[in-house]
Amino acid sequence: MNNSGQPRSGHVVIGVVTHQHVHVAAVMDTIGGIPATLMIPTDTGGFQQLLDGPNSFGRILAFEVEGTGSYGATPASFLRRSGQKVVEAGRPDRRLRRMNGKSDTLDAGNAARAVLAGSRPPPPRAPTARPR
């Protein structure tokens, strides 16, 4: 976990960018500060770390998870079964990404920021079976 200072409020939201082998999460307090980022493996131990790690920064309000129909399906399911609020991360604005740069940490922070902004993304979708 990369700590960049103490949180400034008692509540946090977590934005999660998903990949095949590692997920990147940004912990954001309700004032918009990012006290930590996490890189977690894509296994049960990593998902538990995603759930437990941010608790030291405040009460978790929600997780915004990218790709809940693919790589994000398993962590989203794990978090929901643990009683957490999970929302689907919307597609990032390509124009803003070109202007501000592209990195998993920036994308995770933007996902957390979207939760704070109150944008209403669709509910997480269930993974679809792929035809063989």
Image (spheres, rainbow, N blue to C red):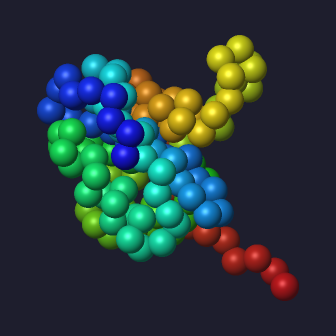
Residue 105 is left or right of residue 5, and the answer is: right
Residue furthest left in the image? 10
Q: Quadrant of residue 100?
A: top right
Q: Is residue 57 above or below residue 126?
A: above
Nearest to the observer: residue 28 or residue 122? 28
Q: Is residue 38 above or below residue 110?
A: below
Q: Is residue 124 above or below residue 15?
A: below
Residue 128 rendering spot, x and y as whole percentages: 67, 71
Residue 25 is left or right of residue 59, and the answer is: right
Q: Report the residue at 37% width, 46% height from top.
A: 1
Residue 58 rendering spot, x and y as whole percentages: 18, 39
Q: Report the residue at 46% width, 57% height from top.
A: 40
Q: Is residue 1 above or below residue 5?
A: below
How many numbered markers are drawn? 0
Q: Quadrant of residue 34?
A: top left
Residue 60 rendering spot, x and y as whole percentages: 25, 45
Q: Report the residue at 28% width, 47% height from top.
A: 54
Q: Report the residue at 21% width, 48% height from top.
A: 55
Residue 3 rendering spot, x and y as whole percentages: 32, 35
Residue 58 is left or right of residue 91, and the answer is: left
Residue furthest bottom in the image? 132
In the rendered image, the quadrant that contains the C terminus is bottom right
Viewer can see residue 65 = no
Residue furthest top in the image? 99
Viewer can see residue 12 = yes
